């Protein structure tokens, strides 16, 4: 590849041709400037909404806030005050609609204020507050259908301003290029306030009902395509084809196929074809409705294809002269990219800024990333492997999987702990010493205070060594615990991707390190692994010599992906296999143990099935513990819909 099409980097997804029709005007109408002010005493009475005129009080109080907002300077210094006024404005909208529903009023001049209020809240930057309000009110409405207030549900109390939500979703997508906000407002536009799912009878036309259901179906499908494109696209061929989709549908399906195959060349070529397709639609003057899904998916393609695009460009960087514009577009795309694959490079660029040096380092980091991913693929456990794997633990730790002690949602699940709690003090250091000639460069040196932070890496260790004395001693509470033999066939049949890796055992001499077959029988090619590691060492050495803190931090972040998959050959008897979850920052998946100083962990995201529970050679008080333990294991199996495991005693005679 000697040339490349930079459309994936340079294509501007901001469609300013729609800016005027999508704009939310902040200017108040003459009448709105003159609405009478109300005192807090007359507005905040205990029985608000049940008195005549309360709807107008809410309206007037709302426009008081709007007038204050209009008078505020646009400086960021006033942002806190602006958000406070918008919060009150949302409360006024809520009170207004409630008062309206209590009076059962349907005069057009009064009913029109709700949409107008929502429009002004959005115009002044209250999108987050309004979204939270509408979601809350919709949940309450659905709850009322099923509760004692079912007979009082009235469409006068609906916040069904779907045209406004759709307009703001389009504004966020086409003008702000904010996909998350766009999807939130498309979600609001799709809400069913009439609760057709609950088969509630409403005296509305069949055409209106069909329009509501179709709108919900369309916007939900859009959200699924964007949030879970790999899962959704497999069904797309059998879905209804909406107007205007034919132009890009096939190219997106092909793109996802290559993304699943991790084919960099195919990803880059399909992304390029997809963008040319979307570009052709825009140049031909396609309508806003026809462009909505195409532009949403274009953001998905841009974000997920950037890494492969960079990989394809990398060999060319020193052969052709990339223009200043291409470099700038690349910098902008990398800084805006949200995929986990490029997080280390993005942080580096944000730290150092755009310059020729950062551009060069960026591609060197990319080369290291590719080498790291190849090594990870070498170590990945083949999902078709039939090896039984065991997890040795104490009875205390096992009890946290059982109903009587498990945290909510953790019944039958394995807790994958942060690497800080590993019992080997050299965790993560073995590979560093091999790559950096015995040094550990990421922990500071004698001239600096040692870095106290731990990466968000979570490890769970297994072994094919079942009922094996050294494992009982090391990990089974000195043979007083239990060995859980896991049924991996259940995971394979569900075709779930589990981040399960063989540990590579390194041996070293004075000058070099080696991957020897006698210690790594599970590796398909120990020689190739050794070659990859030597290449990685050479790549890292080039950046290590720069002695640049931001560069070292980025390199460390990339190496974290494999640092904890290597151990010294003296541990080779364990034949260890590890689940490894990694996060670039704080994540919703994080959980905490109870106690004064909580421990950080994540739960396995696949169904765990225990085939056998082997009690250790020194398992204590068997007659006292077993009846209750057995009952809890049976309950856990029932809750998790898994086959009840065998409970056996270790064959080892322990003296």
Image: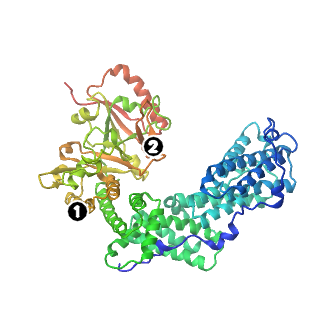
Q: Is the residue 264 above or below the residue 564 in the image?
A: below
Residue drawn at x 51%, y 73% as measured from the top left: 11
Q: Quadrant of the N terminus?
A: bottom left
Q: Viewer-proximal residue, 320 or 390?
A: 320
**Label 1, label 2: how many angstroms apart (C-alpha)?**
35 Å
Q: Which residue is mark 2?
A: 590
- 426 relative position to 181: left or right: left
Count of marks overlaid on the render: 2
Q: Quadrant of residue 486?
A: top left
The way the protein has been coloured in the rendering is rainbow
Q: Quadrant of the C terminus?
A: top left
Picture coordinates of residue 63, whole percent (x, y): 77, 52
Question: Comparing marks 1 and 2, which lies closer to the viewer?
Answer: 1
Find residue 15 and name its label.
Answer: none
Find residue 538 and name its label.
Answer: 1
Picture coordinates of residue 308, whole percent (x, y): 40, 67
Residue drawn at x 70%, y 43% as measured from the top left: 140
Q: Viewer-proximal residue, 535 or 81?
A: 81
Residue drawn at x 15%, y 55% as measured from the top left: 512
Q: Quadrant of residue 368?
A: bottom left
Residue drawn at x 86%, y 49% as measured from the top left: 105
Q: Secondary structure at mark 1?
A: helix
Q: Is residue 376 visible?
A: yes
């Amino acid at each position: 590849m000697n040339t490349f099409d930079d459309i994936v980097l340079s294509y501007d997804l901001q469609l300013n041709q729609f800016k005027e029709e999508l704009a939310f005007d902040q200017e108040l109408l003459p009448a709105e400037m003159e609405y009478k002010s109300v005192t807090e005493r007359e507005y905040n009475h205990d029985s608000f909404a049940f008195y005549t005129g309360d709807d107008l009080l809410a309206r007037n109080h709302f426009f008081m806030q709007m007038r204050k907002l209009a008078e505020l300077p646009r400086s960021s210094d006033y942002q806190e005050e602006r958000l406070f006024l918008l919060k009150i404005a949302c409360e006024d909208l809520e009170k207004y609609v409630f008062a309206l529903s209590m009076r059962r009023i349907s005069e057009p001049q009064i009913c029109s204020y709700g949409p107008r209020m929502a429009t002004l809240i959005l115009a002044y930057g209250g999108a987050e507050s309004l979204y939270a309000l509408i979601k809350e009110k919709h949940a309450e409405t659905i709850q009322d259908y099923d509760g004692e207030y079912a007979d009082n549900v009235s469409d006068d109390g609906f916040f069904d301003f779907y045209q406004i939500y759709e307009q703001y979703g389009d504004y966020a997508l086409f003008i702000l290029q904010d996909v998350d906000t766009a999807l939130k407002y498309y979600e609001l536009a799709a809400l069913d306030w009439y609760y057709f799912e609950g088969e509630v009878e409403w005296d509305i036309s069949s055409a209106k009902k069909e329009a509501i259901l179709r709108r919900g179906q369309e916007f939900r499908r859009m959200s699924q395509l964007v949030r879970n494109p790999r899962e959704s696209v497999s069904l797309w061929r059998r879905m209804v084809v909406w107007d205007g989709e034919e132009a890009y549908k096939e190219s997106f399906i092909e793109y996802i196929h290559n993304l699943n195959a991790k084919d960099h060349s195919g990803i880059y070529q399909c992304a390029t074809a997809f963008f040319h397709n979307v570009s052709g639609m825009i140049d031909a003057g396609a309508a806003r409705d026809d462009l909505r899904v195409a532009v949403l998916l274009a953001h998905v393609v841009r974000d997920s294809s950037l890494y492969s695009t960079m990989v394809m460009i990398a060999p060319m960087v020193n052969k052709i002269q990339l223009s200043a514009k291409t470099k700038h577009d690349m910098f902008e795309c990398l800084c805006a990219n949200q995929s986990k694959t490029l997080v280390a490079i993005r942080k580096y660029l944000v730290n150092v800024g755009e310059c020729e040096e950062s551009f060069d380092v960026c591609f060197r980091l990319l080369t290291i990333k590719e080498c790291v991913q190849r090594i990870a693929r070498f170590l990945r456990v083949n999902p078709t492997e039939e090896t039984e794997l065991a997890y040795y633990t104490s009875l205390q730790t096992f009890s946290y999987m059982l109903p009587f002690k498990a945290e909510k949602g953790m019944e039958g699940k394995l807790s994958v702990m942060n690497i800080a709690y590993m019992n080997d003090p050299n965790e993560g250091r073995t590979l560093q010493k091999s790559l950096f000639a015995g040094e550990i460069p990421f922990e500071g040196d004698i001239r600096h205070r040692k870095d106290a932070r731990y990466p968000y890496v979570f490890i769970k260790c297994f072994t094919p060594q079942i009922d094996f004395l050294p494992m009982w001693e090391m990990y089974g509470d000195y043979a007083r615990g239990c060995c859980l033999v896991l049924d991996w066939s259940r995971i394979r049949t569900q075709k779930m991707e589990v981040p399960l890796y063989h540990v590579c055992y390194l041996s070293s001499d004075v000058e070099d390190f080696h991957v020897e077959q006698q210690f790594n029988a599970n590796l398909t090619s120990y020689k190739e692994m050794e070659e990859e590691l030597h290449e990685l060492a050479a790549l890292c050495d080039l950046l290590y010599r720069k002695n640049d803190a931001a560069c070292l931090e980025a390199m460390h972040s990339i190496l974290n992906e494999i640092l904890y998959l290597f151990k010294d050959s003296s541990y080779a008897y364990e034949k260890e296999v590890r689940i490894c979850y990694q996060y670039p920052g704080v994540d919703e998946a994080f959980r905490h143990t109870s106690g004064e100083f909580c421990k950080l962990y994540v739960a396995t995201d696949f169904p765990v099935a225990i085939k056998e529970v082997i009690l250790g050679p020194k398992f204590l008080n068997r007659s006292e513990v077993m009846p209750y333990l057995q009952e809890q294991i049976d309950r856990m199996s029932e809750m998790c819909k898994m086959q009840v495991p065998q409970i056996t005693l270790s064959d080892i005679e322990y003296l």
